[in-house]
Amino acid sequence: MTEATNELVKLSAAEMGAAIKKGDVSSRELVDAHLAVIEAAEPSIKAFLKVSGDVAREQADAFDAKSADEKAALPQLAGVPIAIKDMIVTKGIETTAASKILEGWIPPYDATVIEKLKAAGMPILGKTNLDEFAQGSSTEHSAYQTTHNPWDTDRVPGGSGGGSASAVAAFEAPLALGTDTGGSIRQPGALTGTVGVKPTYGGVSRFGAIAMASSLDQIGPVSRTVLDSALLQEIIGGNDRRDSTSIPEGPRPMVAAAREGAKRDLKGVKVGLIKELSGDGFQAGVSARFNEAVDKLKEMGAEVVEVSCPRLEYALGAYYIIMPSEVSSNLARYDGMRYGLRVMPPAGVPQTAANMMAYTREAGFGDEVKRRIILGTYALSAGYYDAWYGSAQKVRTLIIEDFKKAFEQVDVLVCPTSPTTAFKLGEKTSDPLAMYMNDIATIPANLAGVPAMSIPAGLSDDGLPVGFQFIAPQQRDEVMYKPAAALEAALEEDWNGPIWKDLKAPWLDGLAGSAK
Ligand code: GLN
């Protein structure tokens, strides 16, 4: 290894891939370096539910043993390790969705995205923590552990994909996969200073993604740079006959768009500021960084106009009807018969199948999941269906129309990703509504099925990362990558390097092979 562990893990995934291709580093060395960071960081970060070190080493060795020609034919990220949100099914590696109801479940198959990562020679470092069944905005609803934000370990990393975001922010993994139903990739991205992408609905196969709300769920990349997400999305994207909502066309040219953006010329790009998602309700430090970033876009030649999407006001309300309705139906499969936990009724209670299911579900699901199952069951019940689910679906159509109209005027929409920076652990756990408000700016893209991404826009006055969100038209994911890469390049010039240089990561000090 030419570089010390704590320098190696700070490379971007694209740089790691290039170093592998040049023969400067092996996949095994990269895996070992990240496993060393994981060991040092996990006591304070707790991003991983399971570290699959043996699997990763085996995969890395198999990759390293390939011939030069075989390696050259693989994607740029070949040999680069990755962490996987425990909402995605991995053959032979326990998959729990951070729920007690799935404890001990070893899937007999891989999700399509995992098959694709394996084909690309990317070793799997482990499974990352999340709010149980991806339901939450802080990762505090995991049945197993609470993940901490690497920028301030007294604070949440966001959710539900706080494990993937923290792992990437803490240099435990250069890349991760997340799932985003209402913001679970982008909001943790904002709170941890990472890049998080929700692709167009249907752009990445959902086969093997544990279903939360199927009309909203989408798997996407978590990374430290825009280019890294583009490279990863091109690997995991594309049609899959095992997902009936998968788009027939292959992935869009996102890598080319990111490389084009890095030239920092945005002449001809029309950017729309979403009027309803700015100002009031957003923390002052968030708005300040957002506005400065918008000025950067203008300096690079973008034309910036304000755009109104009046019906976005109702997005949160519609989401918290549609999502629980789908949750209640998707989670009906956890009945103690087929997977994971089974709790038999105590002596004296009739030992019926119905009682077994009731005891299993009572013991296996946490409070937040139960809250949503009950809400959803109510919203779908006869007599209330039209008033609740039916109305919410109509609102969804109006939101789709708002975006359509907006994209007749502009190429890409922007707003802050999250109204606040990372909040304190425990601050919002007893107030579900306060927790739900986190998703106000991320949910609309899920309801409309359009692609969106969050990139770091700097640190707020409190020293914590702020996220900047780009939203693009459906099936035009590349459209957001260009301005995102341009903004990243411009901001990094101002900061004299990536946002990471301000992260104190004491777990990197004292690693074997560390630079002094
Ligand atoms: N925070 C949102 C929720 O709790 C988003 C979840 C997600 O995207 N998986 O529903």
Image (cartoon, helix red, strand yellow):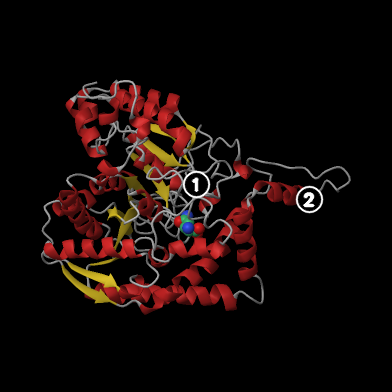
x and y percentages locating residue 448 in the rendered image: 39, 67
- CA distance for labels 1 and 2: 29 Å
- Which quadrant of the rendered structure holds the N terminus? top left
Which residue is tagged 1?
Answer: 130
Residue 459, x across and y down, in percent: 30, 53
Residue 60 drawn above or below residue 165: above
Q: Position of residue 468 (x, y in %)?
A: 29, 59
**Residue 372 vertical placement versus 26 (above, below):** below
> Image point 17% across, 55% down: which residue?
486
Question: Is disc 2 placed on a helix, strand or loop?
Answer: helix
| Viewer can see residue 214 | no
- Would you identify the image quadrant in which residue 507 lies? top left
Give the class, few, some or many, for how many residues have Cα within 10 Å of label 2's Cα (few <14, many ≥20): some
Check the image and name the residue furthest to the front.
461
Residue 438: name its quadrant: bottom left
Residue 113, how many percent across, how many down? 39, 43
Look at 22% across and 75% down and name the residue there. Answer: 409
Neighbour tally class for label 1: few under 14, some 14-19, many 20 plus, Cα within 10 Å: many
Q: Is mark 1 within 8 Å of ligand 1?
A: yes
Q: Which residue sits at x=86%, y=48%?
A: 349
Comparing labels 1 and 2, the label whose residue is closer to the camera: 1
Going from N to C along the chain, the mark reached first, 1 or 2, is 1
Left or right of 154 in this view: 272: left
Q: Name the residue carrying label 2.
A: 355
Residue 306: mark? none
For badge 2, the amino acid type reads Asn
Give the residue type that dot 1 points to: Leu
Quadrant placement of the C terminus: top left
